[in-house]
Amino acid sequence: MDAHHWQNLVVAVLVSGAVVAWLRARRSDLWRDAGRQVVKRRPLACSVVAFYSVLALADAVSWKSDDPDCAGLSQHKPRSVIDRAFRCDFQERSYSAPLADREFYGGNELTFPGLHPMGTDIRGRDVLHLALKGARIALLIGGFTSLIVIPLALFFGISAGYFGGRVDDAVFFVISVLSSIPGLLLLIALIMVLGHGALQVCIAMGITSWVGFSRVVRGETFKLRELEYVQAARALGVSEFKIIWRHIVPNLMHLVVITFVLLFSGLVLSEAILAWLGIGIDGSWGQMIDMARDELSRDPIIWWNLAAASIALFGLILAVNFVGDAVRDVLDPKTLREDA
Amino acid sequence: MSRPLVRLEGLTTWFPIKRGLFQRTTGWVRAVDGIDLTIPVGQTVALVGESGCGKSTVALSMLRLVEPRSGAMYYDGVDLFSLSRDRLHAYRQEIQIIFQDPMGSLDPRMRIRDVIAEGMEAFGIGENDAERTERVAAILRRVQLDPDQMNRYPHEFSGGQRQRICIARALAVEPKLVICDEATSALDVSIQAQILNLLRDLQDDLGLAYLFITHDLGVVRYLADRVAVMYLGQIVEEGETERIFDAPNHPYTRGLLAAVPSVDPARRGVTASVMGDVPSPANPPPGCRFHTRCPEVFERCSREAPELYAVGDGRSRCFLNESSSRS
C-alpha cells in the first residue's frame, strides 16, 4: 500500500470514530443538550469550524487517476479533493499578484492569466490552493496532538489523584521536572531527536503540553474520589479499576472536552512559532507566514502570501476560541450545578 | 438482647497530622478511640453525639473505607479488620451504607438502573442484565418508587426520592446490616418521616439490622432499640433507648437531652447544661474527656480516665457510677 492509501485509511478510521462518538453522545441527554446549546450560542463560529473540518477532510482523501489535463510528473501523483478543485499543474514560474495577467518580476505572460485569486508564491504555486491545504495541517496539529495529550494527562492525573501517596509523589516529580524545563527548548530537543515529520512534531508538542491538564485532572480526581458515590461504590465491592472507569472518567469528560477545544488553538499557534524557528510542519500556515516574512522587505511589497495564511489561521483560531468559550459555559460544573 | 450480628472491639481510628517539608507525622487526630459496640440481628442501634465526635469515622472504619488503626470487628465469628482486601470482598455484601447527602451519593452521570445494579454486578447477583433489571424494578417498587423511572438520571429526582434510590442501592446486594450515616438529616421533616417509616418496614420484612448514626434524638427515640452516646471518639453511655431517654446517667447524655428543643411551652427555655465547644480530638483533655464541659466535674475527673461502669442494662463512663456498680 502506498502512503496515500494509509492516509485514506486513517481518515476513514477517524471519521468512523467521530461518528461513533457522536452517536454515543446523542444517547446521553447531557451531551445532546450541551451540543445543541453550543451550536445555539455560537452558530457562526460552529459553522466556520465545520467548514475548516470539511476542507481538511477534502484534502486528506486522495487518489491517483489518469487525468488527461495532467502532464508529466503530476499524472502519477495522488491528488486530493482540494487538488482536484484546481487545475492540474496550476503553476507559474514565480510571483504573481492576485488576479494578475503578468509575472511580478520580469513581466512575462502567465500560464493562467487572471486565474490566481490570491496570486502565487516564490515558486509559482497558487496561494489560495496552499492556504486551503493548510487547514488539514492545522487540524492535524490540533487534533492529533490532543489525542496524545489527553490520554497521557488522564492516565497520569487519574493515577496520581486516585491512588495518592507514592504514585502521586512519582507523578508529581515527573510533572515538576517537565515543567521546569523551558517548553520551547524541550520541544526543539525532542524534534531534533524524533525528526522533522508532521507526526513527530505532533508527538513532541504532545509530550511538552500534557502537564498542565494533568494537574487539573489530578485535582479533580482527588475531589471526586472523596465523594460519597465513590465511597458507596467501594462499599459495594466494585473494583478500583471499575470505579475509575465508571465513576471517575465520565465525571472528568466535561474537562476533557473543554481542554480539547482550548488546547487546540494554542497548539496551532505554537506550531506557527516552531515554523518561524524553521522546525515546523511542511505546508502549514506557520510555514507560509515564515516564508512570506522575507518578502515583506521587498519593494513593492509582496503581501498576498502573508495575508492568505494569516487570515486562514486567524479565522480558525477565532472560531475555535469562540466555540471553546461556549463549550466551557455549557459544560463547566459551576454552571451545570445550577440546573442540576 | 438477641444474637449479635456485628461486634466491635476496641475500634480505634486515628488520622495523622502531617506537617513540614517532609510531611512528617507530628500528631494524631484521635477520631475514634477504642469503641466497643454490639449490633444484634434485626435490631437498630443508634450512635449519637455532636458534630466531630467521630460518629461518621466509625461508619467508614466499619466498612474499611478508612483503615482502622487497631481493634477488631467480628461478623459471623470472623474479624473483618484482619482480612486482606481480596477476602474482605465477600463480606462487603453483608454491610452497606446510606449517606447523608442524597445528591453527592449518586453519580450524576449514571442512570438509576445502573446505580442500583452496580453492586449486583460486583457480587454476581442475577444471571444477566435482563434479570438484574427485573430485580432493580422489584427493589424500586419495594422503596415505593416507580420502576418506569429507572432510566432517568439522579438530578431528575427530589431529595426524598434520591434517598430512596440510595436505600435501594444498599438493599440490592441483600445486606444484613445497613449503616445509616445521618441518612435523614438533609431531608425535610415530612420526607424524613416517610424515609424513617420505610426503613422500619424494611427492617420488619427483611430482618435488617441498622446502625443509625445521627444527632437527631427524635429519630433515635422513634427508631432505635439501643443507643450509644459518643463523645470525643469514645462511647460515654450505652443502653436501651427507653432507659437512656427516661433516666440518662452520664452528665453528657443529660446535657444532650436537655438541649433538644421542646414543643412543650412549659419546658421551653431550659438552659443547656453543657457549655462551650468540643475540645480538639488531636489533643483530648487528660482524665475524663468530658471534664472540661461537665456540670458535675470534681477534682478526680481531670486526673484519671473513667472506665465504662455497668448501669442498668448498659454502661456509662462516669465516676459517679463507680460505687453503685461495685456494690
Image: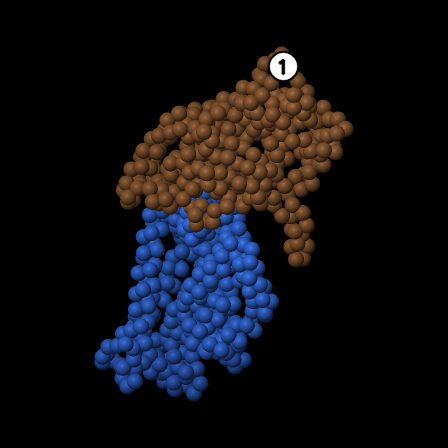
Chain colours: A blue, B brown
Left or right for A130, reference B264: left
Q: Position of residue B327 (x, y in %)?
A: 65, 21
Q: Name the quadrant of the C terminus of chain A.
A: top left
Q: Residue furthest right?
A: B299
Where residue A88 sits, quadrant-wise, is: bottom left
Residue at (49, 38) in percent of width and height: B74
Where residue B121 sits, quadrant-wise, is: top left
Q: Is residue B82 visible?
A: yes
Is B195 above or below relative to A307?
above
Left or right for A43, reference B224: left
B290 or B240, which is in the foreground? B240
Binning the other alpha carbons within 10 Å of mark 1 as few (below 14), some (14 to 19) or many (20 upward) gives few
Q: Residue furthest front?
A: B327
Secondary structure category for the residue under label 1 = helix
Q: Position of residue A114 (x, y in %)?
A: 36, 76
Is A86 above or below relative to A52?
below
Q: Position of residue B107 (x, y in %)?
A: 43, 43
Q: Amino acid at mark 1?
A: Arg
Q: Which residue is mark 1?
A: B267
B121 or B177, which is in the foreground? B177
Left or right for B279, reference A275: right
Left or right for A11, reference A166: left
B184 or A264, which is in the foreground? B184
Q: Name the quadrant of the N terminus of chain A.
A: bottom left
Is B161 above or below relative to A63?
above
Q: Is residue B50 visible?
A: no
